[in-house]
Amino acid sequence: MAKTKAKSKPKAKKTKTRKTPGLDMDFISMKTLSDLTVEKRINTILKKVKEGHMVVLDAALDADEEAKLVTATMHGIDGEFTGIEFCTLEKSNTMAVNVLMRLLSSIFRASITKPGLTFVGPSYLIEKIKRDPDAFYVSTRRKN
Amino acid sequence: MKQFIRKLRGLFNRLFGSKREIRLGIYGEPNTGKTTIANKISMDWLGEPVGVVSEMPHTTRMIQKKEHVEVKAGNKTLNMNLLDMPGLATQVDYKQFLKYKRLPSNPGSNVSFSDLSVSALKKIAKNKEIKLTAKAKKATILKKVKAEVKDSELSALAKELKIKIKAKKITGKYVQSEAKTLAEEATKAIIEAIKWLDNVDNVIVMMDSTKDPLTQVNIMLLGNLEAKGIPVVICANKTDLPKAKPAAIKDAFPQHPVVEISALKGTNLDELYSTIAGQVA
């Protein structure tokens, strides 16, 4: 008895999901973080970085905030998260403006948003940050 | 406020000539020569080293102190407590340690009872007024000493009694569990070094003059020191290497004095001492 070949159903066209490794970049206005304490602000940034995102803020962190960012990063380092690379670019003010900002900051015990730019990313994705006084250039690795 | 108190204290010392000891912190990124310069200063003026130097980053994972270091700088005398800080970094990956050979532990840094000889144990027993018979064996002495001395106080006691401990010979590369421990220690050390920025009077910032000085760690460090009003001397180190470009450091940070040195060869240290002395005065 001749076997009848069962007709195979035409295969449904597979919809390709985009799996090309890419970079996630979050551009965040400092305004959205301004209500938070410095610690909470830093934790918000770090949470995104731990998820593999690059974060760009439209303000420069001050030296104290940078130190707190590094401290919080060190607390968060484990087998998977190895740390951050970051860069701040401050809009250069006159000496008088800088002194005034420091004075106001110490009087009101609050951090005053410094005009500029901050970039923070996971260290495993950033190969190099080359810095000039007025610019910085980020080279990244591909996500696995 | 802290800046104001610091300045007031400086003024008081100048007026009444008190022989104040400054806490001189040596900061910088890993592998910039912090322990090398600390060892050089300490060997020159105290005759003893501060810590172990190696190519592996984060070799220094705890703040190493040398107290009462008296340095002659021209016609001035600098009295200082030298603080060799762990290298500052924004990332610590345990995998980086896997390619390095195990380092011998710093002799005397973490003494255990098994490191002690009979004579050392007797020395401790004498110090603690533990009664021993003339023919007491090592096991007996050890038992009695252990009853009186805690593990945690042993290193300090050995140092106080000037008991010499031989470095343990360990070979081979670090394994994963050891590397993870090193990474954990390194992260804690960085946190501690940042905290200590509030407790130092003067700072030497070490920079490797064969590398780009405009790193975020250097900028963050100098920014914090400037905000706290702590006097800084930047050491453009490794000038003995052909690739050294100390001028790049001077260009990057013109607001601070930069002294070109080779910590390894001990060159130009007199200029470093005079610059620090000038800031203290």
Image (spheres, coloured by chain):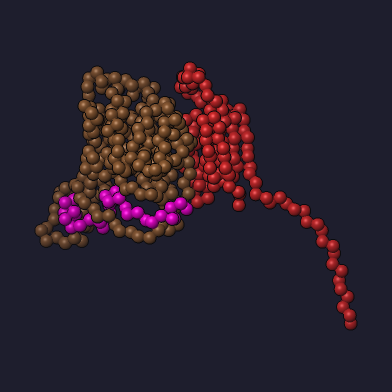
Residue B104, magenta (yes or no): yes
Range of magenta residues: B95-124
- Residue shown at 53% from the left, 28% from the top: A90
Quadrant including the N terminus of chain B: top left
Q: Nearer the viewer, residue A41 or B20?
A: B20
Please say if A143 is above or below B260: below
Q: Nearer the viewer, residue B175 or B246?
A: B246
- Asked if one can make out residue A61 in the rendered structure from this viewpoint, the answer is no
Residue occupying image coordinates x 63% and y 44%:
A23
**Number of marks:** 0
Specify whether residue B241 is painted magenta.
no
Q: Which quadrant would residue B274 be assigned to in this image?
A: top left
Q: Which chain is red?
A: A
Where residue B81 appears, x then y in whole percent?
Answer: 27, 35
Where residue B191 appears, as percent x and y from the top left, is 42, 40
Q: Quadrant of the C terminus of chain B?
A: top left
Q: Kindly give the residue lying farthest to the front in the view shown.
A: B242
Q: Which residue is found at the position 21% from the left and 53% from the top?
A: B145
Residue B228 in the image: state x and y as whole percent.
Answer: 40, 27
Determine whether B8 is above or below A49 in the image.
above
Taking depth in this image into account, of A50 and A18 the one nearest to the observer is A18
Name the colour assigned to chain B in the rendering.
brown
* Residue B153 seen: yes
Q: Position of residue A27 (x, y in %)?
A: 63, 35
> Which residue is at a point 35% across and 42% down the rendered structure image?
B240
Question: Taking B132 as reference, is A130 left or right?
Answer: right
Quarter-of-image position of residue B201:
top left
What is the residue that sits farthest to the bottom in this orientation?
Answer: A1
